[in-house]
């Protein structure tokens, strides 16, 4: 059972994920589950439920994997898949484990800062993916250009928010 079976055969995806070796990432990740519902997301991280009440470090996350990660036109190789899983989602899980304040915004944060908080959170994970690629994670060309487009998009969003911030402060 390999990645290409998981790509082509939805029935084999649970098995593929079950046999994936998370290695050192197990320190931050308690569970990897396949959720067979239609969604536009590849994967996401479910922080430990108690995070809403207690911002304590040392809590592991669950990573949810959705069909879209196997059914899009940019994840072409297992290395692409692992770039998302290990370098992006496990990075979120690591930040949450080490410092949950990086992942859970303060309750009294104003809306524009809240949006900025989540943009920055994503940019850190994207930058971690880029760093791993520079260090030798050999992703496909299509995957890399998709990742670069996501980073560009987030940066544009960030600068449009900054402009809005200026308008707010003038008004
Ligand atoms: Zn993310």
Image (tube, rainbow, N blue to C red):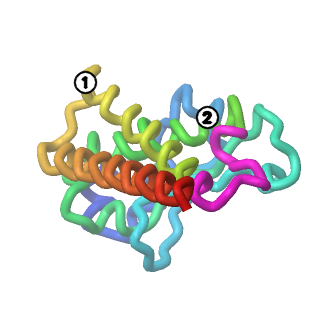
Residue at 52%, 44% in the rendered image = 121
Q: Give the spatial CA distance, label 1 vs label 2.
A: 21 Å
- Find disc 1 in the rendering and name its residue: 134
Q: Position of residue 16 (x, y in %)?
A: 42, 53
Residue 38, x across and y down, in percent: 44, 79
Q: Residues within 10 Å of mark 2 (few under 14, many from 20)?
A: some
**34 or 113: nearer the viewer:** 113
Ligand 1 lies under 8 Å from the Cβ of mark 1: no
Q: Which residues are magenta?
A: 101-115
Is 130 on the left or on the right of 124, as rendered? Answer: left
User: Does dot 1 land on a helix, a strand or a loop?
Assistant: helix
Q: Earlier in the sequence, mark 1 or mark 2?
A: 2
Question: Where residue 88 sits: x, y (%)?
Answer: 44, 42
13, 88: nearer the viewer? 88
Work out which quarter of the rendered image holds the C terminus and state it.
Answer: bottom right
Q: Is residue 76 visible?
A: yes
| Element at label 2 | helix
Can residue 64 be seen in the rendering of this structure? no
Q: Which residue is mark 2?
A: 95
């Amino acid at each position: 059972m390999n990645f290409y079976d998981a790509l082509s055969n939805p029935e084999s995806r649970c098995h593929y994920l079950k046999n994936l070796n998370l290695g050192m990432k197990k320190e931050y990740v308690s569970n990897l589950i396949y959720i067979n519902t239609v969604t536009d997301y590849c994967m996401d991280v479910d922080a430990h439920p108690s995070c809403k009440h207690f911002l304590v470090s040392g809590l592991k996350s669950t990573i949810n994997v959705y069909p879209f990660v196997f059914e899009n036109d940019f994840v072409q190789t297992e290395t692409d898949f692992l770039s998302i899983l290990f370098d992006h989602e496990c990075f979120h899980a690591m930040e949450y484990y080490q410092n949950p304040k990086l992942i859970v915004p303060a309750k009294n944060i104003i809306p524009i800062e809240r949006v900025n908080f989540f943009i920055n959170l994503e940019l850190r994970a994207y930058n971690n993916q880029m760093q791993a690629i520079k260090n030798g994670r050999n992703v496909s060309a299509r995957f890399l250009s998709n990742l670069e487009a996501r980073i560009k998009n987030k940066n544009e969003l960030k600068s449009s928010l900054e402009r809005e911030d200026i308008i707010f402060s003038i008004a």
